[in-house]
Image (spheres, helix red, strand yellow):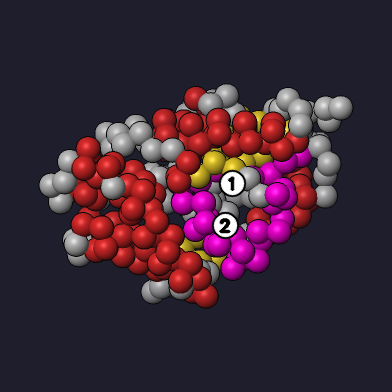
């Protein structure tokens, strides 16, 4: 028998649940990118040669390679190899997965409140490759607060290869993937869907994927930038007011 539809709340990771701090800011993740470029294309480079905030890991890989004169076609052909190289490097050094990262204020309290409810499913929708995203959550001590078995939509699930600034379309597909997985796991149709993120691409993707967009001003983007990207988004300063977040998600 199908269970009652659940509200699905998905979270972006970097800049939303966690942020980078200090001289080792998100260092292992950046190292994983560099390792992939070296191992697969013998290029010594970093992701900082291109704008990458709000993009997905696969699109960043392609964009950096295009910067170095490699065509999208060649980059996409070897994308699986690069993703495997990234994951391998990250997991080999997983003891450093939380270095230079901190959980943002209010996140633990909000996730704990959501975990206690039987009418909500909570997941990640992030441009991170799946093993990298969950390892960050694990090493920061919050992985257990997500619906189990863990599910979501990840950069490793889909990549269009289009690096023309329309990366929100890839994120929209990740939201659709997460919704399908939630429905399969819960054994029912979904209720309302909400996506919480800090970047213009997050809120634009949510609107495109029929998920209510909630923008948080906890990353590098301003209120005005998020509102311009998605005028229908609900914008919050952060997630420290738990009751307010629950109200926005129609849970109070």
Q: Position of residue 1 (x, y in %)?
A: 86, 27
| Residue that mark 2 sits on | 134
Residue toward you, 117 or 213: 117
For disc 1, the neighbor class at 10 Å (few under 14, some 14 to 19, many from 20) is many
Q: Residue furthest right?
A: 1
First in residue order: circle 2 vs circle 1: 1
Residue toward you, 139 or 186: 186
Give the CA distance from mark 2 to mark 1: 9 Å
Drawn side of residue 122 relative to residue 130, left or right: right
Drawn side of residue 85 relative to residue 106, left or right: left
* Residue 126 colored in magenta in the image: yes
For disc 2, the neighbor class at 10 Å (few under 14, some 14 to 19, many from 20) is some
Q: Position of residue 37 (x, y in %)?
A: 26, 59
The answer to whether residue 186 shows anywhere in this view is yes
Relative to 123, say whether 7 is above or below: above
Q: Position of residue 8 (x, y in %)?
A: 69, 36
Drawn side of residue 84 relative to residue 11, left or right: left
Kindly identify the residue that appears in the image at 35 percent across and 34 percent down.
160
| Residue 142 quadrant | bottom right
Kindly identify the residue that appears in the image at 40 percent across and 56 percent down.
84
Highlighted magenta segment, given as a residue range:
120-149
* Residue 103 colored in magenta in the image: no
Residue toward you, 84 or 214: 84
Secondary structure, mark 1, is: strand
Secondary structure, mark 2, is: helix
Q: Position of residue 53 (x, y in %)?
A: 37, 48
The answer to whether residue 224 shows anywhere in this view is no
Quadrant in which the C terminus appears:
top right
| Residue that mark 1 sits on | 124
Kindly identify the residue that appears in the image at 76 percent across and 31 percent down.
187
Kindly identify the residue that appears in the image at 21 percent across and 57 percent down.
41
Contact? badges 2 and 1 (CB < 8 Å): yes
């Amino acid at each position: 028998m199908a269970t009652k539809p659940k509200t699905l709340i998905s979270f972006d990771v970097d800049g939303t649940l966690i942020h980078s701090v200090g001289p080792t800011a998100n260092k292992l993740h950046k190292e994983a990118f560099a390792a992939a470029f070296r191992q697969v294309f013998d290029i010594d480079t970093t992701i900082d040669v291109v704008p990458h905030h709000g993009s997905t890991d696969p699109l960043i890989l392609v964009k950096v390679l295009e910067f170095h004169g490699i065509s999208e076609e060649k980059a996409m052909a070897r994308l699986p190899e690069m993703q495997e190289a990234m994951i391998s490097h990250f997991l080999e050094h997983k003891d450093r997965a939380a270095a230079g990262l901190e959980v943002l204020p209010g996140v633990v309290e909000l996730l704990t409140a959501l975990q206690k409810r039987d009418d909500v499913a909570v997941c990640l929708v992030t441009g991170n490759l799946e093993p990298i995203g969950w390892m960050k959550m694990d090493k920061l001590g919050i992985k257990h607060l997500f619906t189990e078995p863990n599910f979501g939509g990840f950069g490793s699930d889909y990549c269009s290869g289009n690096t023309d600034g329309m990366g929100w379309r890839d994120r929209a597909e990740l939201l659709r993937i997460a919704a399908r997985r939630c429905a399969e796991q819960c054994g029912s149709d979904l209720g309302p869907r909400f996506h919480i993120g800090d970047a213009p691409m997050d809120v634009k993707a949510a609107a495109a994927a029929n998920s209510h967009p909630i923008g948080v001003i906890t990353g590098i983007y301003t209120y005005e930038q998020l509102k311009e990207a998605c005028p229908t988004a609900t914008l919050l300063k952060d997630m420290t007011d738990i009751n307010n977040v629950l109200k926005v998600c129609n849970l109070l």
